[in-house]
Amino acid sequence: MSKTSPHLTSKYEDITPLTPVETPRPMSADARKKAPGGNKPPQVQVSMTMPKSRVGPRPSSKMSNRKKFIDFGGFMMKKPKTDQPWIQRNIPYKICHTFVLDPKNKKDEKACSCGAEEEEHEPGYTKDAAIVEWNPSLHVRKHNGSCFGKIKFVEEDGTHQPDYVRISDDMMSRKSGSMRVMELLETRWRLPRPNLIISVTGGAQDFQCPPELEKRFKRGLAKAAKSTDAWIFTGGTNTGVMKLVGEAVRGTSFGSQIVTIGVTTWGIIKNREQLSVTNDRKIVRDYETKESKIRRGAFLDPNHTHFLLVDDGTQYKYGREIKFRALLEQKLSERYREGNFTLPQICILVEGGPNSIKTLLETVKLGNPGLVIAGSGRSADVLAEAYRLSTPEEAFNKDGEKITIRVLSESSTEELNVVVSKKFPNMKPEDKDKIHREIIELLNYDKLLTIYELNDSKEFDLALLAALIRGNKDGTSSLASMKLAITWDRPNLADSLILPNSKFSEKEKSDLLRIAIIEDKPIFIKMMLDQGVDMKHFLTHGMLAGLYNEIDKSVVCYKKLRKMSEGGSIYNFQASAKKIKTKLSLIHIGMMMEEILEGTYQSHFCSKEFRQNEDDMLSRPFENPYDVMVFYAVFVESQEMAKLFWERSRTPIATGLIACKILRYLAETQKNRLKRDDENEKKLLICADEFEALSVGVMNQTFKDRNHQKELWLEVLQIKHRSLGNLDLVQLACTTEACNFIAQGAVQTLLSDIWLGQIHAAQHWIKIFIAACIPFIGPLALMRFTKISDGTDPDGDGQNKTKEVQVQLEEKDTELELATLENGQEVETDAGQIPEEMTRKRKLTAWEKVWYFYSAPMVKFQYYVVSYLVFLGIFIYTLIFARPNSNNADTGDWMSGSRYSGFEVYLLLYVLSTIPIEIIQIVDEVPKTFRMKLWRYMQDLFNILDVLGIICFLAGFIVKAFGEPSFQVPVSGELDLRNAHHILMIVSFLTYCVRLIQMFRMNSNMGPKIIMIQKMMIDLFFFIFLMIVFLIGYGVCAQALMNPNQGMHNANSLKSNGSIVWEIIKRPYLHVFGELDLDGMHDELQRGHCTSEGLENDSCTLETIQHDPIGQFHYYLVMCLLFVYLMFVNILLINLLIAIFSKSYEDIQADSDIVWKVQRSQMIQEYKEIPICPQPFSLIYHLFTFIRFIFRSCMGSCTKNAGDEEVDETAIYRVSMIEAESREEYQSKMEEDEEISASSAYKDLKSELEAIKTMVRQAPAAASSSVGPSPAPPNSIDTPLRPPPTASKLTRIKPMRVHMDSRISPYPNSDIKRFKIPDNKVSWLVRYPEYAPVDYTSPDIADLTSDLVDPGEITLKTNIQFNKVNYSTVNNKRWTIDRTSHHGVYNVVDGIPQNPKGRTGMIGRGCLKRWGPNHAADTVVTRWHRNKQGEIVKIDGLPVLEFVAIFRPSFNEWAIPGGRVKPNERIFETIKREFSEEALANLSRPAAEQASILEMLSEHFKLGITVYKGYVDDRRNTDNAWIETIAVNYHDSTGKSFSKFPLQSRAGQVTESGSVGVQWIPIDHNLDLFANHEWIIEKVCYHRDAYNPIKEPKRKESELWMTGV
């Protein structure tokens, strides 16, 4: 096979590789006579299909069975087992076997009625003059020949070789024949499954098409075919529209991937004899398209991929393939039916003659849409003009359904006749009438007929697909159209044509979502979710199992899942897998998840309850469906889908960390495969890093936004998730090896708190060490401790055991959170009322100070370090300085007379005390199986050293028991137990000495250096293998040259075999360090070249050897080897090692800090759990713990396991809401960064264009004066550029617009106008020297002197501390004023606070009472909107909310009830007060009624959800004073609780129409509320999964000047 045949290797299956087979039996003479072709020698035929694996190179010429193979395009292929390949047996064609003179052709007396000349007939034809009329059924017969293979166009480069076959015209008319054609296309040609059939018809002759229209047609047709995996059908010849289609397909980079089938009449092909050669064994046929002996007909187009050459036995007669082609397209449409939906097809008319209109009409009658290219010529122009002249009218079809048709008036008919006459000037009147009737009939199919014109704004590919959508023939057209859009991956069609005019049922939406998930179309998944698909109802256990069974076989996890279904281990994935027909179950998914995550993720799929009730569980939904779908998307390697579901996940941080772990595992699996895919491995690692970055980003946002609310972000890190094996985020990050997450600031802050315990952070470590050296008195006298809450007590383990879900909220924190439990039910909890004991702090008692001091991991670490140093010191003394007892003499030691000294007993106790610690460390590992626990334990080098040190010490201690009592180590003689004991102790000491390095890991300077040493040791380990090659090579050669006769059986050999090997290794190794040892080499040379007598009498010396020819040659050869060895090793390899170390140092230096923080976290966790008393005294603690465990086990009162601990679902949901808010803020920040980046690029582009404009203006005046001024072109440089579109939003909620209302003039309740600020000058980061804001402070508050209101003069503000909580005393009462911002620290310039969101055009305080942030609280009270029957109103399948709104007359806008937070007032109190005053008019009621209303609100406002905290775009804001709010949503799901509220407006609180100023307003239309309240309402809709109609609000007239409109 030639290298230029890309399609050849996959389409000929009957040709097999070099395998011996029987030679085909030759045909007899009689059989040859009866066979077609007459008495010719037998032909060797080959099949038309051949897999790649069966193609081999040409065998050697010496091959014994060479005759059994044939040449096939440069490759040797085995001859087929049968004389007739599949195509020859199953695909016949027709030939005329009887010559009948054509009576109509009087000019040519040799012409047959079939159209062929007499000499063009096949051999063996008959000629009977008696036959007058030629009958195809009698004079044409079918024939099986060799007209198939591949076409090599001689004029082309040979890289494109389309398949072809000559086929009978009646094959599609019979069921058996159509099935063979389908098998030809699918099995033999192996064409991919089509998603669309595009049939192009039109002019068969060359025509002129407008260049722009031709360009659009070519580009659009190829793009549409590629995006939809379509098959294109044409006439196949190199003329007219067929040539145009071929150029369109091959003119793109992906042209060879588009299936373009030419269905052509065999009899009109020029040079067809080159395709019908029967005595040639080649499958590739050479075909010329330049010259032909025959003038009639047309050449084949070289740009098609396949040809069906339809033969009815005639020659030079056009149109014989039309019926075959129509039946083929119809059969394909039915064959690839999916349920009630057939394969879509469309007919495109380009130019064309009269028959083209009929072809289009027949297509439309079958219900297939047609697309007419107006402007291409003739028939297409006539149809386009008829469509333009007609008018639409309503009519009824045969079934009584209302349809739209188009009707031509009399005047329009006359105009159309003129156009027909112009386009077809030589047409007969009866043909014109026929065309007119066909056009009238075509216009009755208005829905199926689309006209594309050059001035159409749509690209051609969109117009083509839109025509398909518009003319969908299936009953449920909207659903079918949406499925087509998903299959074609065309979201623009769905957005513009389908969704606006369709309303899908819940079942249809779920079906579409399932298709989008299986086909990995994230944009469509988002569309369906936005359409209101309820994931809790959609994603049942059965649905998830079905999705996993649909995953592609190419993904990495597929083979693992199949191994699981076999019952094999996931780690044995290299084993050959059998073909599994059983379906995957969720149990297999759970097993895979648990093994990949090493026990971190405890899937309920593997629980006993699920295994026993698997069939019943399949219909149950998931509580957190988005988390489950993130893992599914990660397994199928769809990053976009995974991110889409992650954006809606309930626990984004934990989900991101698990996804990161899974992706890294899949990448490692890909790396270990025999067939590696480096690109996929790199992609998986990038995706893993991206998920880790997302988790880190969300945690950073949580830490940043709640930096002053430490208890909140600490709860996020410390809450334990039941589904994660009761692990918190820090433990999960350590398990998943998310180093960047562990190095994050919040995690490190938490670890620092754990490290110090309750010791104050300001204490120096030296001071702590001194306090530790003074028992009990030191902690009380020298240490400072932090305060604790009343509910915190130390337990017996020395740990701070507060309830895991308890949150200590500060006064300004959000008190109200929503608690949800299982099955989506809401449970009221007293989240609004904060118990006093949770916020009250107290000092530690003396006992608590001592306890917390000694239980702090840092103090434990100091004690353990000191005990370890003492242990090493005693060990050193025992090895070096201690004298063994001799003959049981009394040495004064307390252990005198014993075999062991007191120091050795101490060492033994120390080593024994380390054993329980190591055992506990193994048991506490996360994996469930002991094997995996032990594997993770052995991953740490220091753990291996611990085990080695313990084993060697105990072995040495036991060995000493069997030695002599004195046990003095002998220094001569044979090795005995005393030497073994000594060596074991030395090895044990060495391991413990190296183990000391671990102590330095806590130091920020030494920790990274230790990591670098570990990494460089790995580099050195691999470098040693490279050096050994040179070392062994030189050592062996040098030894062989210096002592050539040395051997075991040589009498002159003076060394044993062991010493020889030692010399071979030692000498070159010492050479590396500069120890050449030339004297030793000379001695070795003498021993190898001198006899024993010569050595004894010194008659054989080095000088003697150097004068000997052999000795001289050996000597200088050894010196040359030494020179080369030193050059390579000392110069090349050593410098290479230095370069490797330098590169490793640079690589490690960037990440060493992160890795050190990871190791630091592991060490902190380790010292948090170990006993207070150091070794060896900890042995007593472990013994006591073991006895207590045994006692409790026997008494049946053993404590609960960690997995049985109760977890507060309220706290878990509260944490999930905090994570969700942080995720939204993080995504908004990322979007803002993208917008800033796009804006920066726009500014750079604009600057470049301004520079070009300046250069143009500075052109020489002479150049313009000689020619005259030229007008500026349209859209020239002077035209302002539009900024580039920003990135699409990642969240369902658009970011809040800021500084729109804050820049509106005039200022409320005044005539003061602000300084006008353009949008691009709002930010303080943008220089704006012309900025001259108006200074205004309302007279109503400027003269107030109360200490509760800030002074109006700036010079009087010196006692205000911004970015802090201020305290002041007025009338002997302490007042608290919060001057911190929800957005963090704001700037204070010259003592004046600066608006964090930018300029407003006004300085001063306006009508606000405080400089800086003015805190407020808004109450969003909601319930479900119900109709008169009490049913919840739904829009697009989503329930509609309604909320309590009040009317603000001063702004003439509806708003959410709310107001400012007074000094000393808590948020919950503000919410009750403002709602009661604004929505219930509480101030106008009697005192008793006021108290009753407040009590009612306290009862009903027990649960809520914080939907927003931050800046408010309020008209009252200035550069120095602004409003920030906390918006809390209270929801009544039943509608019974809040209906008790006596809504009443205050005096004057009425609308302009006179309606009541307090109302329940349904959120079923676009709202325009006060400030940013509509944005808050939108967030409420999001959190409540309710219908959200809010769009981008229209700008008010007063805003227009700000944007230059």
Image (spheres, rainbow, N blue to C red):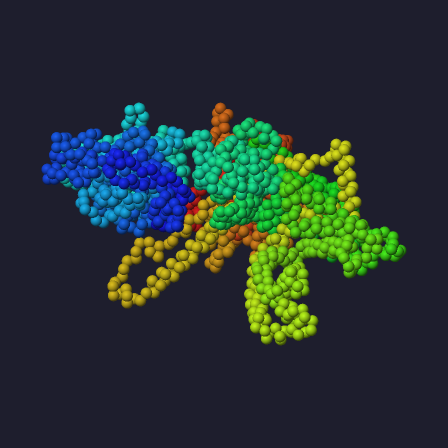
Closest to the observer, 1505 or 100? 100
Note whether residue 1094 is visible: yes
Horizontal relation, residue 384 to residue 745: left or right: left
Q: Is residue 237 left or right of residue 1439?
A: left
Residue 98 vertical position relative to residue 704 in the rendered view, above or below = above
**Which residue is at the front of the view, 891 or 802?**
891
Residue at x 75% of width, y 50% of height: 955
Question: Residue at image x 75%, y 32%?
Answer: 1196
Residue shown at 42%/45% (left/top)? 1597
- In the image, residue 574 lies at what x, y percent? 53, 43
Examine the rendered structure and indicate whether residue 1130 appears above or below residue 282: below
Residue 218 % position (x, y): 30, 46
Residue 1108 screen position, x and y as percent: 59, 73
Horizontal side, residue 827 vs residue 184: left or right: right
Q: Residue at x 22, y 35 (%)?
A: 95
**What is the quadrant of residue 1068 in the picture?**
bottom right
